[in-house]
Image (cartoon, rainbow, N blue to C red):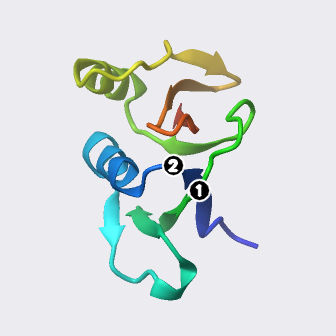
Amino acid sequence: MTAIHHVAVVVDDIDQSVGFYTRALGFRLSAGRPGTLGPGAWLDVGDQQLHLIEGTPGPSRGQHFAVLVDDLDAEVRRLRAAGFDVSDPVPVGAARQSFLSDPSGNAIELHEK
C-alpha cells in the first residue's frame, strides 16, 4: 500500500458541507461521483478525495481526518479571520497541529510537518 485514496465522512447537510469544504478549505468539487450512491459529494484535495455522505453524523470525538498544510500559523489566522473556531497550534513530535470542526461537527486536523 502506498497512500490513502479517500476518506468518507457523514454530514447532515450536503450543500452546507460542500460550501464549507470548498470555500473555507479550498477543496474542489469532483464531477465523477456516481449517482447510484445516494445523496453525497466527492471533493478533491491534492491527489486524494474526501467523500461526503449525507446522513446523521456520529460523535466526532476521536474521529477525524487530517490535511497537510505548509504554514499552520497562516492557515489558523486565515480561518479565524473567516469566523471559524480553530484551536491553537500545538507540537506533536516534530510536527504541529490544530483542529476545527465542519458544520456537521466532524473534526478536521490541520497538520504541519
The residue at the point 34 percent across, 47 percent down is 16
State which quarter of the image contains the C terminus.
top right
Is residue 112 visible to the viewer in this orientation of the structure?
A: no
Horizontal relation, residue 86 to residue 36: left or right: left
The residue at the point 70 percent across, 42 percent down is 58
Q: Position of residue 24 (x, y in %)?
A: 30, 40
- Identify the residue under disc 2: 12
- Place residue 60 in its image quadrant: top right
**Up-down relation of residue 75 to residue 106 (above or below):** above
Horizontal relation, residue 8 to residue 101: left or right: right
State which quarter of the image contains the N terminus.
bottom right
Query: Circle 1 sits in a helix, a strand or a loop, which is it?
Result: loop
- Viewer-proximal residue among 13 and 87: 13
- Residue 41's disc is none
Q: Residues within 10 Å of mark 2 (few under 14, many from 20)?
A: some
The residue at the point 49 percent across, 43 percent down is 68
Query: Circle 2 sits in a helix, a strand or a loop, which is it?
Result: loop
Q: Position of residue 70 (x, y in %)?
A: 40, 38
Asked if the residue at tag 1 contacts the one at tag 2, i.e. Cβ–Cβ closer than 8 Å, the answer is yes
- Identify the residue under disc 1: 55
- Place residue 37 in its image quadrant: bottom right
Q: Position of residue 104 (x, y in %)?
A: 51, 39
- Viewer-proximal residue among 87 and 52: 52
**Up-down relation of residue 49 to residue 85 (above or below):** below
Task: Kindly identify the amino acid type of the residue bearing the numbered disc 1.
Answer: Gly
Task: Kindly identify the amino acid type of the residue bearing the numbered disc 2.
Answer: Asp
